[in-house]
Image: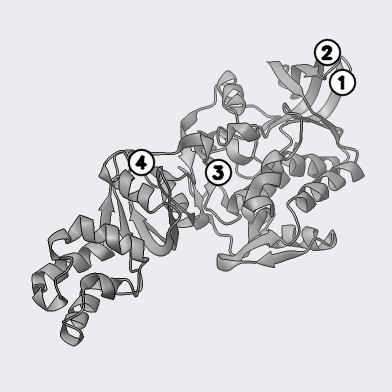
C-alpha cells in the first residue's frame, strides 16, 4: 500500500503498454518511478489483444500508418524507438514470435509473454506498481524554478482502503482512452488534460465494425459468418482485406481499417471483385457461355449465399434467365455495382468493440521530441490518450512503445 506524503521522481497513470514502457525507461535513468493502475490487473488490453497472441508491432512502420490531425507529430517518437528496437527486446527475452500477412508480428505462445517481459524490465530497475489505485485531485506545484505535482490517491483492497497524498517532479498520463471500457478504458486522461487547459480534439471510436439500419441490415444478418476479400474505400482511403458479415452489419480487418476514416453520414464503396473488372468478366461470360445463369458465373468468384442475396437485390426478375438474354448495358451496370457497391452505414459499434479511440489530446499542445506539455514542464501524455491512432496490424502497440520510451527519456 502507498504511504502518505511520499515523493517520486516520476508518477505514471496507467499500467498499460505505454505506461509500463515509460516506467522502466525512466527508471533505467535512475529515476524513482511509481505506476498507478486503477483496475485490479495490469496490462489487460495487452493480454486480450490479437486473440490472446498480441500483435505487438509491424515490420513496416511508417507515419502513413497513423491517423492524426498532425500527421507529422508521430515521426520523432517512431524514429527514436523503432519496431526493430522492440523486436530486439522480444528476442532478448527469448519470446517466440511469427510474421503474419502485411508484416504483422504475433507471439507464438501467448500475449502473457509480452506483459511478463514488460513487468520483468520494470522489476529489474525497481519500478513500483500499485493496482486498485483511484486518482483523486491533482495539484500543480510547479514554480518558475522546478516542476512538481501533488496527487491524492485512494487505494482499495477487499479488506482496507486508504487515501494518500503523493508528490512527483514528473507526471505521465498513460491512462488509455474510451475504447473497450470492460478492459479499463475511460476518459480520465481527457479530464486531466482539461484541468490543465489543454485542447482536446473530438473523440470517436476507431477500428470498429459498422452497422446498418436500412434493408442492408437484413442482408448482413442472413450472411452472418460469411467472409471474403474485398476492397473498401471511403474519403480517399482504400484497403483490401477480409470483410466479415455480422448480424449487425459488417466487420473484419478491412472494415476496421476503413472505420478510422468513415464519419456518420458518409457512404463506403465495396469492390466485391477487387482483382477483376466485373463488367469485362460478365461480357466475356455472355460471349462464351451465353446459356449460363449469371449467379452460376458469379458463384465461381463469390460465396454462393452472397450471390443469392445480390440476385434478390439487383436482378430479381432475371434470376432464371440465361446470360444471353441480358443486354450489354445491363451487364455493364451490374459490373459497376459489383466493383462499387455503395452502402451507407448508420453507425459504428462504438467504444464497446472499438480497438482504439480517435482524437484526444491535441498534439499541438505537446512537444514531439519528448511528449511533454509545451507550456507546463513535467506533465506528459503518451499512448492512446494522444491524438495519434494506428491502423490495424500492430501499429498502436508500436505507438505505445515509442511514445512511452520517448517520455521515459525525459520524465
Mark sitting earlier along the chain (4/1): 1
Q: Position of residue 1 (x, y in %)?
A: 88, 21
Left or right, 393 with reference to 410 = left
Label 3 element class: loop
Where 255 sits versus 92, above or below? above
4 vs 3, front mark: 3
Residue 149 figure quarter: top right
Q: Which residue is mark 4?
A: 263
How far is the residue under mark 2 from the one under mark 1?
A: 8 Å
Dot 2 falls on a residue whose secondary structure is: strand
The disc placed on residue 162 is: 2
- The residue labelled by disc 1 is 2
The mark that comes first in sequence, 3 or 2, is 2
**Which of 409/217 is in front?**
217
First of labels 4, 3 by sequence position = 4
Q: Is residue 241 above or below residue 199?
A: below
Q: Position of residue 382 (x, y in %)?
A: 64, 38
- Answer above or below: position of 113 versus 152: below
Give the residue at mark 3.
355
Q: Quadrant of residue 34?
A: top right
Q: Which mark is residue 345?
A: none
The Cα atoms of the two marked residues, 4 and 1, are separated by 45 Å
Residue at x 77% of width, y 49% of height: 112
| Colour approach in the figure | one colour
- Give the SS element for disc 4: loop
Mark 4 and mark 3: Cα distance apart in space: 17 Å
CA gap, disc 3 to disc 1?
Answer: 32 Å
Q: Residue at x 80, y 20 (%)?
A: 167
Mark 2 touches mark 1? (CB < 8 Å): yes
**Label 2: how many Cα within 10 Å (few below 14, some 14–19, many 20+):** some
Q: Nearer the viewer, mark 3 or mark 1?
A: 3
Amino acid at each position: 500500500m502507498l504511504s502518505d506524503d511520499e515523493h517520486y521522481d516520476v508518477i505514471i497513470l496507467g499500467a498499460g503498454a505505454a505506461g509500463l514502457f515509460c516506467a522502466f525507461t525512466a527508471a533505467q535513468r535512475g529515476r524513482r518511478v511509481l505506476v498507478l493502475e486503477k483496475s485490479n490487473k495490469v496490462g489487460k488490453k495487452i493480454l486480450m489483444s490479437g486473440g490472446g497472441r498480441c500483435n505487438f508491432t509491424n515490420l513496416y512502420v511508417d507515419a502513413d500508418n497513423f491517423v492524426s490531425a498532425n500527421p507529422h507529430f508521430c515521426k520523432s517518437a517512431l524514429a527514436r524507438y523503432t519496431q526493430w528496437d522492440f523486436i530486439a527486446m522480444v528476442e532478448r527475452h527469448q519470446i517466440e514470435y511469427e510474421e503474419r500477412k502485411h508484416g504483422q508480428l504475433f507471439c507464438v505462445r501467448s500475449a502473457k509473454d509480452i506483459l511478463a517481459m514488460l513487468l520483468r524490465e520494470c522489476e529489474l530497475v525497481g519500478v513500483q506498481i500499485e493496482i486498485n489505485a483511484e486518482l483523486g485531485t491533482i495539484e500543480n506545484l510547479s514554480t518558475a524554478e522546478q516542476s512538481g505535482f501533488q496527487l491524492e490517491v485512494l487505494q482499495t483492497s477487499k479488506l482496507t482502503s486508504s487515501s494518500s497524498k503523493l508528490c512527483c517532479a514528473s507526471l505521465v498520463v498513460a491512462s488509455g482512452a474510451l475504447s473497450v471500457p470492460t478492459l479499463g478504458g475511460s476518459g480520465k486522461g481527457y479530464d486531466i488534460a482539461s484541468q490543465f487547459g489543454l485542447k482536446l480534439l473530438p473523440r470517436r471510436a476507431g477500428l470498429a465494425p459498422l452497422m446498418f439500419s436500412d434493408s442492408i441490415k437484413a442482408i448482413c444478418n442472413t450472411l452472418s459468418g460469411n467472409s471474403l476479400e474485398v476492397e473498401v474505400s471511403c474519403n480517399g482511403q482504400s484497403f483490401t482485406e477480409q470483410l466479415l458479415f455480422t448480424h449487425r452489419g459488417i466487420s473484419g480487418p478491412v472494415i476496421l481499417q476503413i472505420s478510422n476514416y468513415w464519419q456518420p453520414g458518409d457512404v463506403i464503396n465495396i469492390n466485391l471483385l477487387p482483382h477483376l473488372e466485373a463488367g469485362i468478366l460478365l461480357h466475356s461470360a455472355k460471349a462464351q457461355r451465353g446459356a449460363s445463369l449469371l449467379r452460376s458465373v458469379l458463384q465461381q468468384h463469390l460465396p454462393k449465399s452472397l450471390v443469392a442475396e445480390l440476385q434478390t437485390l439487383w436482378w430479381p426478375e432475371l434470376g432464371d434467365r440465361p446470360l444471353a438474354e441480358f443486354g450489354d448495358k445491363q451487364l455493364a451496370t451490374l459490373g459497376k455495382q459489383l466493383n462499387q457497391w455503395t452502402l451507407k452505414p448508420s453507425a459504428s459499434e462504438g467504444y464497446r468493440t472499438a480497438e482504439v479511440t480517435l482524437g484526444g489530446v491535441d498534439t499541438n499542445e505537446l512537444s514531439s521530441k519528448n511528449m511533454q506539455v509545451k507550456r507546463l514542464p513535467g506533465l506528459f501524455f503518451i499512448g492512446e490518450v494522444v491524438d495519434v491512432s494506428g491502423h490495424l496490424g500492430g501499429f498502436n502497440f508500436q505507438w505505445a512503445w515509442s511514445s512511452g520510451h520517448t517520455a521515459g527519456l525525459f520524465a
